[in-house]
Image: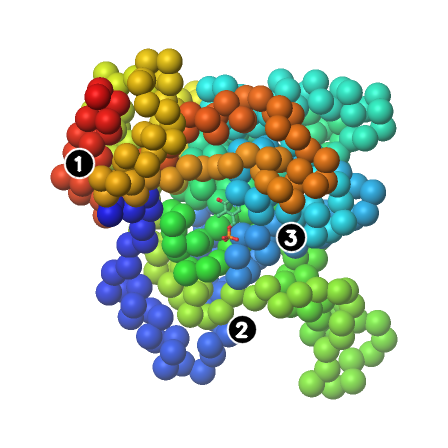
Amino acid sequence: MIPYGKQEIIQQDIDNVIDVLKSDFLTQGPQVPAFEASLTGHTGSNYAVAVNSATSALHIACMALGLGEGDRLWTTPVTFVASANCGLYCGAKVDFVDIDARTYNMCPVKLESKLKQAKANGTLPKVVVPVHLCGQPCDMKAIHDLSIKYGFNIIEDASHAIGGEYNNAPIGNCEYSDITVFSFHPVKIVTTAEGGAALTNNQILAEKMELYRSHGITRDADKMEGESHGGWYYQQIELGYNYRMTELQAALGVSQMTRLNEFVSARHRLAKRYNELLTKLPIVLPFQLDKTYSGLHLYVIRLKLEEISLSHKQVFEALREKGIGVNLHYIPVHTQPYYQKLGFSLGDFPESERYYEEAISLPMFHLMTDEQQDTVVSVLSGILEA
Ligand SMILES: *Cc1c(COP(=O)(O)O)cnc(C)c1O
């Protein structure tokens, strides 16, 4: 089976992790700050807080922004469930904004009309989470302008987008958001096995997220109530979690980050090849927004079902049967049973649901060979032209 995504681990990655195993610190040592420095170095953001997953990063980001009961978080239906669940963890209500038909990202026009209505009803969101689906940046300037007009905070879920650019600047610089979140799960662009990070330019948000990732405990005398009792002393000043990243994970991340540009350009080379090889098929190829450079975590095609004799499911299963490890990103979150119980229904976000009926993620990863890609193209052509 040709997988849809796969990590690349080289000897340098392995050596870096082994060095940590032989060192004094398996956790809470120098590797996590080094990894954070590689993230701020790449993006230009002021702060990076590395944690054990992007899910944890989304949670502490929401907490730092003060999201709580009675508040609202909006995101896109076409994302992994974690982009929405972080709102529920904080006791907030979650709602969605339908996608743009071309980019598959949260549609700024639909966002504005939903905001207008919410303003009239007194139900404006406190936090909006745009997701850079497949690595393609959302129209962040437009969303940021709306955040000023309607007074909400922005968390960019950039789990697919490290290494990408918006308006010639790196995703993660937080120019148009309060916080940006990355994921380092092995299918993503850079991996730490499990891992995530929250980036920000705001010192107060960074300090809060650092507290929340480790029990709400501080060793900083300036943040304590009263006097320190001595060298052993710490205080719990907030309710936090254990969301820490280990030194092993961070060491892998440090090593992987040195190859970020290589990873993303390899994906661009493959995407360009797909674009050329697939033009004649009855499918819609990925659209690229002006002045953006995608991180290209995923290569998603959409079937022109009216031109194909098979159903979406039949095409998908025929590909899997022939050894092509296709996938589907994503089942619209509002259609999940858990969200249906919260009151959402099929039909609520029609553009997202249409996307779900047509989308297929083709295999794309750094080590994919031209031969493997040619196999994907010929199998897909054979199925669609049958
Ligand atoms: C992978 C992913 C997450 C969650 O990442 P983890 O690191 O696995 O917690 C969140 N949002 C999106 C869009 C993702 O793709």
- Judging from the image, what secondary structure is the residue with disc 1 in? helix
Q: Residue at x 35, y 70 (%)?
A: 17
- Closest to the camera, between mark 2 and mark 3, is 3
Q: Do the residues labelled 2 and 1 touch (CB within 8 Å)?
A: no
Count neighbours of disc 2 (C-alpha within 10 A) and say few if under 14, some if 14 to 19, many if 20 or more: few
Disc sitting over residue 375 in the figure: 1
Q: Residue at x 33, y 13 (%)?
A: 307
Look at label 1 and name its amino acid: Thr
Q: Is residue 156 visible?
A: no
Please state which amino acid type lies under the numbered disc 3: His
Q: Is mark 3 on a helix, strand or loop?
A: helix
List the residue tagged with mark 2.
Answer: 28
Quadrant of the rendered image containing residue 378: top left
Q: Name the residue under label 3.
A: 59
Picture layout, residue 374 above or below residue 68? above
Residue in the picture at 28% in, 34% down: 318
Extreme residue toward the left, this view: 371
Q: In this view, does 347 lie to the left or right of 272?
A: right
Pinpoint residue 3: horizontal percent, then vertical percent.
29, 46
Among the 4 quarters of the image, the one containing residue 115? top right
Mark 2 vs mark 1, foreground winner is 1
Q: Where is residue 338 in the image (x, y as percent from the top left)?
A: 65, 44
Residue 249: image location, x then y, percent:
43, 65
Residue 222 x %, y %: 76, 69
Q: Cα distance, mark 3 to mark 1?
A: 40 Å
Label 2 secondary element: loop
Quadrant position of residue 282: top left
The yes-or-no answer for disc 1 within 8 Å of ligand 1 is no
Report the amino acid beneath label 2: Gln
**Which of the numbered marks, if any, corresponds to residue 39?**
none
